[in-house]
Image: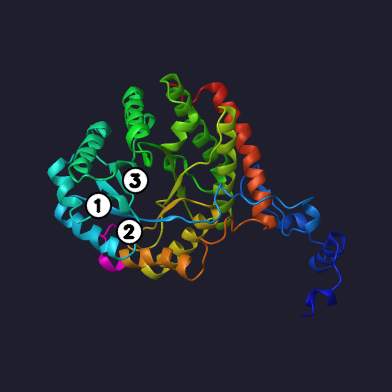
Amino acid sequence: MKNLLEDFQPVSKAEWLAKMEKDLKGKPLSDLQWHISETVSTPPFYHPEDMSRPAPPLLKGRSSNEWAIGEYINVKAPEDAHTALMEGLNGGVEAPLFRLYQPIGEADIALLLSGVAPEMVALNFGEYYTNKAPEALFHTFANWLNKQKAPLKNIAGSIDFDPLLDWSEPPIQTLAQLMRNCIEKMPLFRPLQVNAKTFHGGPEQVVDELAMTLAKGNAYLNALEAEGINSQAANAHLQFGLAISKSYFVEIAKLRAFRLLWANILKGHGSIGQPFITAHFAHESQDDKVNTNIIRASTQAMSAVIGGIDRLYVLPSNHVTGEPDQPFGRRIARNVQHLLKMESHLHRVADPGAGSFLIEKLTAQLAEQAWARFQELDQQQAFGF
């Protein structure tokens, strides 16, 4: 078969620049720079000469870009939450996140998870009330698992336990004991989350967002090492909750940069590995046009997936109106992820953003600046215990 590209002569960067300067009729090319922040900007075009060699794809130690389809389940009445859960599971949800608005007991857990095979789905819990007690929640869940004779080594999931976020005196000993239990009995369960959603401020603050997330995660590794848990084990039971907003290319590059940076943090602790990232939509000021928000959900989900997240939560399109979630809205939110897998096949390519000059350059730029900022925060012990 004839190679059609042979009919076209390569064009140098200098030739492209000359052509653009002519078309701009004296207007400086620098006026077309995309200024993301005071320190981060991108040129209006890229050329192969800008990259001495292609950056290697970020494989994360795996051969695909598989992610788990998540869904929020609001638990105000266990019966209603169970109905929503079964609807979601039948619709393809793989990682429900139970948002608890009051403490629950073992009877509530039994009602909530009735008919669920816990080894077949990742079960995640977040406490959205005062006087949080993650240790009690974990033991309630573990007791239910034991009564179900569930294979604990196959139980995946998490607890949104971020000691530096919710406690004036971070209960690091409680966290360490939870992590020891998981290391011994539940190797796929993650009892610690670095909740970085509070650091999200849009593309203008993306460098600080990355640096603060790194600093907080590193502080946890240091604290857990002091409790006798090495960084390799801690990372296996840790997840990062990151917010995703509308700046499509910035969000892709942010996630890719974070994966590089966290691997560097682990290297500094004498370990190897990658971060486990859950992506959540940022609570932005959006209008109440449901169809517009469906489009926003699609592009935000796509940027998260191309960036390489491990679990994704897509908000129903009426979320910002304050109305209760409806089955149709939850179904459409789930189907956004199904389309990205079943029609776009983004789970089959290990690093979909690899090879894009814009994304590669922006990834490198964010990583370099965020690392410098992290070093400043680390010296200041911004998240010390």
Between the residue at mark 1 and the residue at mark 2, the CA separation in whole angstroms equals: 13 Å
Image quarter (top left, top right, bottom left or bottom right) of the C terminus: top left
Give the amino acid at mark 3: Asn
Label 1 vs 2, first from the N-terminus: 1
Q: Is mark 1 on a helix, strand or loop?
A: strand
Q: Is residue 70 above or below residue 3?
A: above
Between the residue at mark 2 and the residue at mark 3, the CA separation in whole angstroms equals: 33 Å
Question: Which numbered disc covers residue 335?
Answer: none
Question: Which residue is at the front of the view, 383 or 73?
Answer: 73
The reply to whether residue 306 is visible in this rendering is yes
Q: In this view, does 228 lie above or below 125?
A: above
Toward the bottom, the furthest residue is: 1
- Magenta stretch, residue numbers: 319-329
Check disc 3 and report the residue beneath it.
154
The reply to whether residue 77 is visible in this rendering is no
Check disc 2 and report the residue beneath it.
319
Q: Position of residue 266 (x, y in %)?
A: 55, 32
Give the amino acid at mark 2: His
Check disc 1 and report the residue beneath it.
74
Is mark 2 in CB contact (under 8 Å) with mark 3? no
Question: Which residue is at the front of the view, 133 or 41?
Answer: 133
The crowd level at tag 3 (other Cα within 10 Å; few <14, some 14-19, many 20+) is: some
